Image (cartoon, coloured by chain):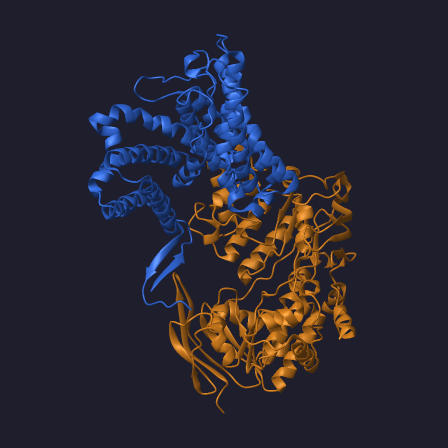
Chain colours: A blue, B orange
Amino acid sequence: MIALEKRPTPSRAWSAAAPLLAVALTMVAGAALFAALGTDPLAAIRTIFWDPLFNEQFASYSRPQLLVKAGPLILIAIGLSLGFRAGVWNIGAEGQYIMGAICGAGVALALYPMDAWFVFPTMVLAGALGGWAWAMIPAILKTRFRTNEILVSLLLVYVAEQILASMSLGLMRNPEGGGFPGSRNLQQYPAAANPELVAGTGMHWGVVAGFVAVIAAYILLNRHMLGFQIRLAGQSPRAARFAGVDPNRLVMICLGISGALAGLAGMFEVAGPAGQISIDFNVGYGFTAIIVAFLGRLHPVGILLAGLLMALTYIGGELAQFMLGLPAAAIQAFQGMLLFFLLGLDVLSNFRVRLGRRKVT
Amino acid sequence: MTPLLKVDGLGKVYPGVVANDRVSFDIAEGEVHALLGENGAGKSTLVKMIYGLVKPDSGHMTLRGVPYAPAEPRAARAAGVAMVFQHFSLFDALSVAENIALGMENPPPMGQLAGRIRAVSETYGLPLAPERLVGDLSAGERQRVEIIRCLLQDPRLLIMDEPTSVLTPQEAEILFATLRKLAANGTAILYISHKLEEIRALCDRATILRLGKVVASCNPREKTAAELAEMMVGTKLATPQRAASETGDVVLEVRGLSLPSPNPFGTSLRDISFSVKSGEVLGIGGVAGNGQDELLAALSGESAASAGAVRLKGQPIGDLGPGSRRRIAVLAAPEERLGHAAAPDMSLTENALLTAAIREGLAARGFLRWPAARAFAEKVIETFDVRTPGPGNAARSLSGGNLQKFVIGREVLQRPEVLVVNQPTWGVDAAAAAAIRQALLNLAADGAAVVVISQDLDELIEISDRFAALNEGRLAPPRPTRGLSLEEIGLMMGGAHDMEVAHAAV
């Protein structure tokens, strides 16, 4: 019989080892999956994890993609993790990401073709405000009317997508675009563009913002009263009230921060890698960031690593589809396994396994 | 004559703790048998093994001479062993009969069941109307639901776990009469309690456990309460000493405090008024669920009242939150240790920060001063003799008594002018309870105003200067504790008045 027994104190060793072990188990199970599909498992694993970074043929293209993809994931996931720790479930980062992009691009398009130093900073501000405002809708509805922020924030994603479509077909459509949907390309508007800062690295201002967010979140959670209150409210809501934490204020702060960071991510994306507002601008960073946040155990450094790993599986997955003809579903299953194993191993940090004859009564 | 139940060498080991070590005793038919011991002595584990909730590691039991090893409570019930738990498992929104039907394997039709409930309740003097909603019942009446649920199975052995902790003295008397009647009809009762006087009044025999072992067996009627206590603890107990303190000016004043309950089965506070002077301990008694939690929340600042309803030295503070009240030295310690007074998964250092950040200067401009927080936690641990390897350990790893010492110590060391505690020694062993009571008395002697909300009347008589009873959210006017008899206190707590109501309804 296998029995689980609660540990008196959570095991630090297991919390640290679980993600590594989860990655290892994912590779083993993934290899079995790929073998069952008739692909050489070693080649598949190498294509996903090794080739994007070190293969001479692909690395020059895919290595910069790592930061391009990891940047928004990390920025959004850091914001979400603060809320998740406090028990505030913002599932609508995708919508806040879209609204941040629309607001940031809106500023640029309104000022076009002005060439002034303040164009880009104003866009940054507008992007953060756009995401923040979109997150304030579930926040106010929750604090005033006790609605569920999970549903409200999620459904607002679809509203944001409609606004995005309307913007790319109407108000923001490029007047010189020959009637095609989509805005002007901001990469061709120097005052508003978010270019690659160091050639060949993929590093742009959004990635810088992501790294800054990691450091700021680390300090907030470990050294600041607000971070302590966030952790307290998530672990023990009643004790938090007793400690004097105002739950409504915390809901506003957490949704506000996560919305603003998601909005920033959207703004940096539209001014940089994406370049324009278009109907298919959003590719699911806001949802994937939820996985990244949990994969990184809601810890800032963990999220940094998880964001990079997630970006790697995306790039490597695309490469595997292209090179080995693996179906997209197999790649998604592979990514799903990663979360599955992590959550499964998570149990071990709070419980120890006892093998023995002990019967369960 | 073969005993009803014979327990022979039962043992149970949990990781790091020997809960029961070769426990042997027996219970005769029709006997009221007390199981005595401090918290953590192994009483609960022992009865859980008898009731089939826990499987013993060693030893065996016989019931009427036949080997008895229940694999689950259902098997125990089938063999004629029933148990009334300290905490009830009843649904507020269902009627008495529906609740009882839920616990039965093959419930009879509702009308027939109601008839049986009436019959049993009349036979044993436990008035209870089957159609009433459990949410509307008092704690004593809820307990009756649980007892009748057991009696409907016609048990040979009835186990009762601290049944009087939720009763007024008058209600307890009614319960004792029922138990005596049951015993006279041949049902054996295994009675767990650490209230020694009631054991002396009720029980024929007592088995005393200490640290998982049977240390003595006696007829409690031939012993004094002090002798029984010494057998339980193993040493002589120091009773808290109070310095003859002078009471000063009124520090805390509550005037016309009314607060509607936030949920339908909570208790609303109704027009509560009292005042506490510097150097004084005000005891607030009452049966559980009569507004204790709500009153503590109103005094700690977790529930906001109108500003003038609570005053500190004349200044209105009723609308301040917990943080603002701490700033002016109004502190509190709620009843529920894990999850309310302390965060279970956080370390003691973090839990020190939880209430002491403001008064102990553990944060500077929002940034936490971890070394200072750790030092404060260490100071609490040392001053209050909290048994733990260190401040880095999670709150949930501490035993109830040790965590309670930490929670009380954390507030006491912040030099409060007003300290409000709810159930300060609930589930705490005798030595720790004495230490906590002494700390509260010392605090008052140093000039603080102390409010102790408790369901332990002996505790209130021991440490409070004045006593008031909370009943259905109303507070009776406080009276000097000296000279109050247990009888009078019981009447102040609402006595057994709801019994007559139930009688009329039947």
Q: Is residue B3 above or below residue B20?
A: below
The percent coordinates of residue B339 (x first, y second) are 54, 50
Judged from this view, the residue extending furthest toward the bottom is: B1
**Residue B150 visible in the picture:** yes
Considering every residue shown, the one lying at the far front of the view is A179
x then y, percent, for residue A153: 54, 37
Q: Nearer the viewer, residue A276 or A69?
A: A276
Which of B404/B162 is in front?
B162
Question: Residue visible at 58% across and 67% down?
Answer: B86
Q: Position of residue B365 (x, y in %)?
A: 55, 28
Q: Is residue B378 visible?
A: no
Vertical order, B117 against B138 (above or below): below
Q: Quadrant of residue B125?
A: bottom right
Q: Which residue shows up at 64% across the image and 82% down it?
A: B180
Placement of the N terminus of chain A among the 4 image quadrants: bottom left
Is A212 placed left or right of A92 in the picture?
left
On screen, residue A273 versus residue B498, left or right, reads left
Q: How many marks?
A: 0
Where B249 falls versus B401 (above or below)? above
